[in-house]
Amino acid sequence: MGDNFQLEAAAKRRNHRFNGGGGDDDEGEEEECCDVEAWEILSKGFKEVQTVLNHNRLLIQQVNENHQSKIPDNLAKNVDLIKEINGNISKVVGLYSNLSTNFSSIIRQRQVIASAVGKNISEENDSNKALEGVES
């Protein structure tokens, strides 16, 4: 619960800065939606990684205990435990790869949004200048 709260609070603080202190515009709501979704995606990925790493820690502890016991049956069990550890390491690599891809996609999405917002502001400024010229 604490991690989710911290991530959501960080997303809200970040969004507050992006929106110039907040506001009621639709673009701000869209950004907030994207920020929350981004945090949820990344948070879920990191939780999956942590779960696998925690499991590996337990497996490594078991391997160490089996090794220290020097009981032949326990030493034989280590072969399967080490294979499972190696499989989990591959799983973590895949999860981090997915996180990297997701993070890159989020950044690209943010750049597209920022570019569109900047373009709209520029067009609005041009329109205002044109109207000022007509009124003079």
Image (cartoon, rainbow, N blue to C red):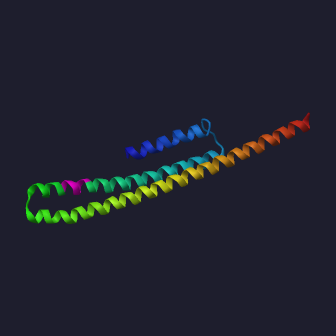
- Residue at x 11% of width, y 54% of height: 68
Q: Position of residue 78 (x, y in %)?
A: 18, 62
The location of residue 108, given as percent across then percent down, is: 58, 52
- Residue 136: quarter of image: top right
Apparent side of residue 15 relative to residue 56 in the rendered image (left or right): right
What segment carries the magenta color?
57-62
Q: Residue at 31% of width from left, 60% of height from top?
A: 88
Q: Nearer the viewer, residue 79 or 8?
A: 79
Residue 101 falls left or right of residue 113: left
- Decide if residue 83 is on the left or right side of residue 40: left
Question: What percent of the width, then of the height, locates residue 38?
Answer: 51, 51
Instruction: Residue 59: say if magenta.
Output: yes
Report the residue that reaches farthest toward the top: 136
Task: Say above or below: 17 vs 51.
Answer: above
Q: Is residue 43 left or right of residue 72?
A: right
Q: Residue 130 sits in which quadrant?
A: top right
